[in-house]
Image (spheres, grey):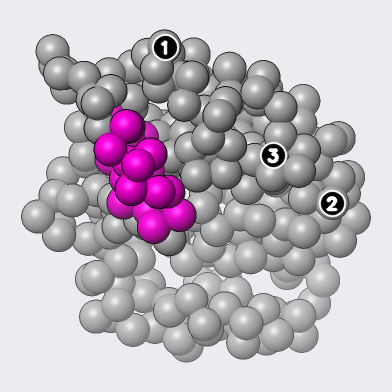
């Protein structure tokens, strides 16, 4: 067991590990230690006391054994203040991201600050054949490009995605639901013109209608565009919580 693994196990909560495994049914139960999110601040303080070589080994020797090691890696990437260093560290880790609970924790301030430099990378990731690389690309597009820097062209690439991956399609739906909240006039044209696949189209409408940031008038209008699905294009992974996808828990827009 590595020194960093020993630190993580100091904060183990087996009941929380059981719960986490139900939220992330794509990973086996033995992949979870059971570390609650607030504990990572203390964990990061502790690992800073380790020899630099120990931390370097942790960041570069991939893949990790435990889900919480992946969460820790994302937390450390979020704290990198140099753009090039942050981007390099993220790109090295991207192929090993294996759950929504890891990918969705990504939000480095330095990437947001340099988002125009980042944009070509996001477009490249969205075209990836790796589901969680695609997801990260759309996640950061949603977080960084739906406000003042928004352009309608940013939605074109995600709208072209046709995937059998549940967590890709849920991310696409989340992106468009958020776009309907923040950029209604543009986003609604993608719904009107049926540019998304049927499942994602309907899920985006559902998620947008769950938000209190969309008017009742807009919700009523959105519901007129629901489409009948001929077949399921994205199925929630089998797991706990009555097989409700973790995304459905995560993506209730405020």
* 200 vs 253: above or below: above
Q: Around disc 2, counting alpha carbons within 10 Å, would you say few (fewer than 14), some (14 to 19), or many (20 or more)?
A: few
* Image quarter in which the C terminus is found: bottom left
Q: Secondary structure at mark 2?
A: helix
Image coordinates for residue 96, horizontal then vertical, percent: 54, 42
Report helix, strand or loop for mark 1.
loop
Compared to residue 135, the image places residue 105 above or below, namely: below
* Nearest to viewer (mark 1 / mark 3): 1
Whether 45 is drawn above or below 71: the answer is below
Q: Nearer the viewer, residue 93 or 57?
A: 93
Q: Answer left or right for 183 relative to 188.
A: right
Q: CA distance from mark 1 to mark 3?
A: 22 Å
The tag earlier along the polypeptide, 2 or 1, is 2
Query: Of the numbered discs in the image, which one, if any, rests on residue 193?
Result: 1
Say which mark, if any, is on residue 144.
Answer: none
The percent coordinates of residue 145 (x first, y second) are: 69, 39
**Is 212 contained in the magenta span?**
yes
Crowding at mark 1 (Cα within 10 Å: few <14, some 14-19, many 20+): few
Nearer mark to the viewer, of 2 and 1: 1
Q: Residue at x 52, y 73 (%)?
A: 5
Q: Residue under circle 2?
A: 113
Q: Nearer the viewer, residue 194 or 116?
A: 194
Question: Residue at coordinates 84% horizontally, 51% vertically from top-left?
Answer: 113
Residue that extends furthest to the left in the rendered view of this protein: 242
Q: Which residues are magenta?
A: 202-222
> Mark 3 Cα within 10 Å, few/some/many (few <14, many 20+)?
some
Label 3 to label 2: alpha-carbon separation: 12 Å
Q: Earlier in the sequence, mark 3 or mark 2?
A: 2
Closer mark to the observer between disc 3 and disc 2: 3
* Label 3 sits on residue: 145
Q: CA distance from mark 2 to mark 1?
A: 33 Å
Q: Height in image: 251 above or below 8?
A: above
């Amino acid at each position: 067991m590595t020194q960093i693994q020993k630190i993580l196990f100091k904060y183990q909560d087996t009941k929380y590990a059981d719960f986490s495994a139900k939220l992330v049914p794509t990973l086996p139960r033995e992949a979870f230690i059971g570390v609650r999110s607030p504990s990572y601040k203390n964990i990061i303080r502790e690992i800073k006391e380790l020899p630099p070589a120990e931390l370097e080994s942790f960041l570069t020797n991939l893949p990790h054994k435990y889900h919480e090691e992946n969460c820790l890696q994302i937390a450390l990437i979020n704290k990198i203040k140099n753009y090039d260093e942050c981007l390099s560290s993220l790109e090295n880790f991207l192929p090993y991201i294996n759950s929504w609970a890891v990918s969705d924790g990504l939000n480095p301030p330095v990437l947001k600050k340099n988002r125009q430099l980042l944009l070509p990378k996001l477009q490249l990731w969205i075209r990836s054949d790796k589901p969680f690389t695609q997801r990260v690309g759309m996640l950061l597009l949603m977080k960084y490009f739906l406000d003042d820097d928004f352009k309608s062209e940013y939605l074109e690439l995600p709208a072209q995605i046709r995937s059998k991956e549940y967590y890709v399609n849920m991310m696409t739906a989340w992106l468009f639901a958020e776009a309907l909240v923040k950029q209604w006039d543009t986003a609604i044209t993608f719904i009107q013109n049926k540019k998304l696949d049927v499942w994602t189209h309907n899920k985006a409408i559902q998620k947008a209608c769950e938000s209190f940031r969309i008017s009742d008038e807009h919700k009523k209008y959105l519901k007129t565009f629901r489409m009948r699905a001929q077949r399921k294009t994205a199925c929630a992974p089998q797991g706990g919580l009555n097989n409700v996808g973790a995304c459905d828990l995560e993506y209730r827009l405020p």
